Image (spheres, rainbow, N blue to C red):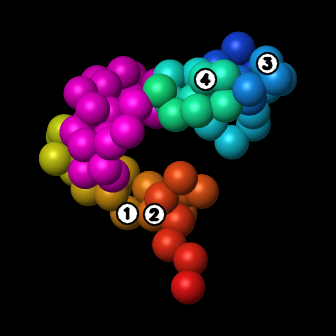
Amino acid sequence: MPLTEDLLGTDADGGKNPEYCSYCYKDGAFTSECTMEEMADLCAQFVDHFNANTGQHLTRGQYKDGLLQYFPTLKRWKQTD
């Protein structure tokens, strides 16, 4: 999801948080507790919207696979040693 100004999540003080979208992060907390797999399932239902905006023709499975490769790079799920 592109993190445009109108889609940014908010910190506890109400300020915009540039790392998360408003669907995932609000008032300084995640809006739901879920695993990467669950989040990929949720996001994969929007593959048609993604395809329409990018000109790609991914299947739901291909899109989910891509998300599962990308999500570990995000702060929420990044593994630290």
Query: Residue 69 occupies which quadrant of the picture?
Result: bottom left
Q: Which element carries disc 1, helix, strand or loop?
A: helix
Contact check, label 3 and label 4, Cβ < 8 Å: no
Highlighted range, magenta = 32-58
Give the main secondary structure of the magenta stretch: helix
Q: Which element carries disc 4, helix, strand or loop?
A: strand
Q: Can residue 8 be seen at all in this image of the molecule?
A: no
Q: Nearer the viewer, mark 3 or mark 2?
A: 3
Residue found at x 50% / y 22%: 23
Left or right: where does residue 39 sit relative to residue 21? left
Report the residue marked by disc 2.
72
Residue found at x 66% / y 22%: 27
Q: Is residue 41 magenta?
A: yes
Report the residue marked by disc 3.
14
Q: Nearer the viewer, mark 1 or mark 2?
A: 2
Q: Nearer the viewer, mark 1 or mark 4?
A: 4
Report the residue marked by disc 4.
26
Task: Mark 3 or mark 2: name the one nearer the start of the chain.
Answer: 3
**CA–CA distance in space, label 1 to label 4:** 25 Å
Q: Which element carries disc 3, helix, strand or loop?
A: loop
Instruction: Compare residues 45 and 27 and report the one nearer the observer.
Output: 27
Task: Mark 4 or mark 2: name the one nearer the start of the chain.
Answer: 4
Q: Is residue 35 magenta?
A: yes
- Report the amino acid beneath label 4: Lys
**CA–CA distance in space, label 3 to label 1:** 31 Å
Report the residue marked by disc 1.
69
